[in-house]
Amino acid sequence: MSTPLTHEQRTVHFLNRTSFGPTRETIQRAKEIGIRAYFEEQLAPDRIPDTFVEEKIAALKTMRLSSRELIELYPPPQKARDQATGMAPMQGPRQVILELQLARLLRAVYSRRQLYEVMVDFWSNHFNVFAAKGADRWLTTSYDRDTIRPHALGRFRDLLLATAKSAAMLFYLDNWMSVAPNSFLAARAPNLRRRGINENYARELMELHTLGVDGGYTQKDVQEVARCFTGWTIRRPRGEAEFTFEPRLHDNGAKTVLGVPIPAGGGMGDGLKVIDLLARHPSTAKFITTKLTRRLVADDPPAAIVGKAETAFRQSDGDIRSVLRAVIDAPEFFSLEVYRSKVKKPLEYVASALRVTGSETEITHQLLRYLGRMGEPLFLAQPPTGYPDVGSSWVSADMLLTRMNFASDLIGNRLPGSRVRSDAVGGADAVARLIAPDSLSSATRAALAETEGRDAVALLLAAPEFQRR
Amino acid sequence: MDGARRLFLKSAGLGFLALGLPPAFLVRAAGAEQVARGKVLVVVFQRGGMDGLNVVVPFKDHAYYKLRPNIAIAEPGSGAERGIDLDGFYGLHPVLAPLKSIYDRGHLAILHAAGSPDNTRSHFDAQDYMELGTPGIKSTPDGWLNRHLRETARSDSPFRGVALTAQTPRSLAGNAPVLTLSSIEEFRLRNENLGQPLQRLYAEASDPLFRQGANSLFEALAMLRKLDAKIPASAGNYPMGRFATALKQIARLIKADVGLEIAVAEIDGWDTHVNEGGATGQLANRLKELGEGLAAFYQDLGDRIDDVLLLTMSEFGRTARENGNRGTDHGHANVMFAMGGRVRGGKVYGRWPGLAPEVLYEGRDLDLTTDYRRVCGEALTRHLGQNDLSKVFPNFPRTTPLGIVT
């Protein structure tokens, strides 16, 4: 193995991977109590006071409302006109999604529970829901608050089940419409719009949420899993938007999933059996830990570290905290091979820029639009894969240009609602130390020498060093 | 910054400046301006799996109507809600009317029961396979369009391969430099002070990913600055939306002669599992945007259409039978369009496999009778002069051309 990382490098590396970027304060704290103790603190987010960001979130009214309240209070524009409520254009469902985006970015920048926010981001992307699809415009707020966030550091099986029962996922992957053709209602209600099996959720459940595409399932398994989940539906997507199991839509016949027989008459238990089967399947342990180490360690994570995470996943029955400990405790985590190897995705780039400069921001449309142009509009990944997590996906000419333009707009205080701390503006040197403790490349130092004041800080944020974490 | 460090940075900077920057990119940018009117291949990827059976409808195959009691497109006849007769067997979806005159002029060819032969019904695998050009093999490092560019180094223009998409599509990704733009107008650096220093430091970056990305960025910026006044305005009547906007920008790049050889655009929203609709509805809305966009592009190009070949493709077709939600699930073979001045159009190509239960692929989908690589290969050889397809489509046997491209 090559030269070990210095203490300074280890600290910055650790914070780059377990938070949305180091700040002066977090570096100091991690040095004071040590990386391992800092990590344990982060694993217990409930014990970290977080009033500063929670007060900002509290100002976003939609974040507290139930799906039903959101549907009533933020109707689609057409309905709003019918009711003559005279709403401003940014009201209605667009406002709901906007506040969700604002909250996500605010937390990424300001929350002190950084590891928790990193994991929320990871799982939201893993169990992706496209917030602009129909009723999901009102369902994604609850999905984030009541489905993902409570389980982000919990047990994988509980998280998987929560997503399976969430109105947002049931709607996004169409399972709420999937009906056994031989079911009670399909046979007796000739006008029922939903009359047959829909495979969409069953397929993505195995391909993307658990086993992985090469995880050992067949088209027949997709069909059988779809039968198991018939009747897992939503009362009314645009009204009582809650999960319900409707036995009169369920296929009560016997099924076989991945070679395991599921006897007839299981009712809702069929789906629960599938969840357990998939959550504990060896392919799932491998697939999930590969993806998690891709996020935390390297695009192509070393086999040794994936192996350790996989063992921890299996031995702890999918306890996410145990898996995270196994990753951080593996010597490969601090190896030079993976140091600074990850390209920041847009959310990581924008949040880390705001954090490293100590910026004050209310997060505005303009800021969110930059995220969109960099390729990561929050909650708006249309395909169920979510956003990619490998560097080459985020480095096109256009994306680099957008990052450069963002850096100069931010540092030039040309982003409405955002102000860079004045000592950051004067201190390209101090910012440089937070970005690259082991000194910048000679090219970056040369370029810095040609720029002054604000331009120097903008240049640092636009430089290749700051594109990686 | 403290004085000593500032001084150090200054001197390091001077040392670097003394090395100078190779002005090659400027020389080449100026040269590429004179690139002759070249041939251009435009690839339109329809993400989500288009339901080809409702786009080019086999109305004489009676199994079609049995399989789709709620969403079928009616046989041609009188009325707007009916298919448009193409050849007595196939009918075009009624909202694709703007394409009919192009078909009649012989500049639009249709290929049915075509696509990728792999049987995956995963969007993501199927898209990857199709874009990599190696169905069934995921480890292929680059896309088929990129391999074509790599194997035919015709010019140094940064605009040889351009994607007008949010992210670089797999088909165009690889070692040959390509450009991804969302808009020509917004493609400029907002703080000009940073241009020179950023260009220098990225040129020196030890990180090849960033070096290459920035290299195409700065070359393209330089070229666009020079071309700014010369890019003609659009002549087509483009509809709203990202797809048509992408085609509009592609047409401008074609007319500006910047050395464009391959362009990629995308149109998504084809994953019609629920309430697909028939002559109107969800699929019809997507087709309206597609058809009006293609027709506007055709009109906009005027006689330049002779240099252009546009191909459409989607990762798979959809189940022959409608599902329980008046939609369709992931299927297999599909429809492709080829549009251009040198297309032998006005004809539906491809052997029709039928829709009877016993001939359906895996008992549920339209069977595949033409591998999409056949038509892609024909486009590369006949339109772009690619002599060796073995590097572009490894493991794909040589086939006789379909004769779609003259």
Image: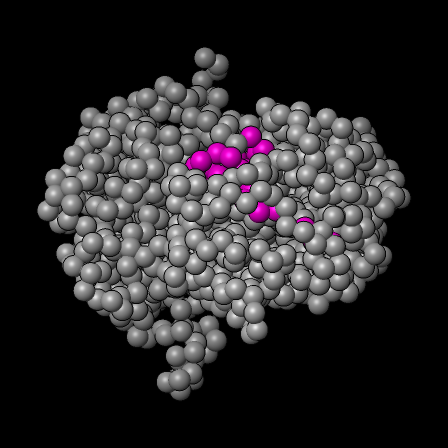
Residue B257's x, y, as percent?
A: 83, 48
Left or right: B309 with respect to B350? right
Q: Which residues are magenta?
A: B107-134
The quarter holding residue A1 reads top left
Residue A131's x, y, as percent?
A: 40, 58
Residue A322's x, y, as percent?
A: 24, 31
| Up/down of A409 relative to A319, above or below | below
Q: How many marks?
A: 0
Residue B109 within the magenta-colored segment of the rendering: yes
| Up/down of B378 relative to A303, above or below | below
Q: Residue at x 78, y 42 (%)?
A: B406
Tell which of A73 and B326 is nearer to you.
B326
Q: Is residue B336 visible?
A: yes
Q: Residue at x 16, y 34 (%)?
A: A261
Q: Residue at x 36, y 74 (%)?
A: A75
Tell which of A56 and B161 is nearer to you.
B161
The quarter holding residue B273 reads bottom left
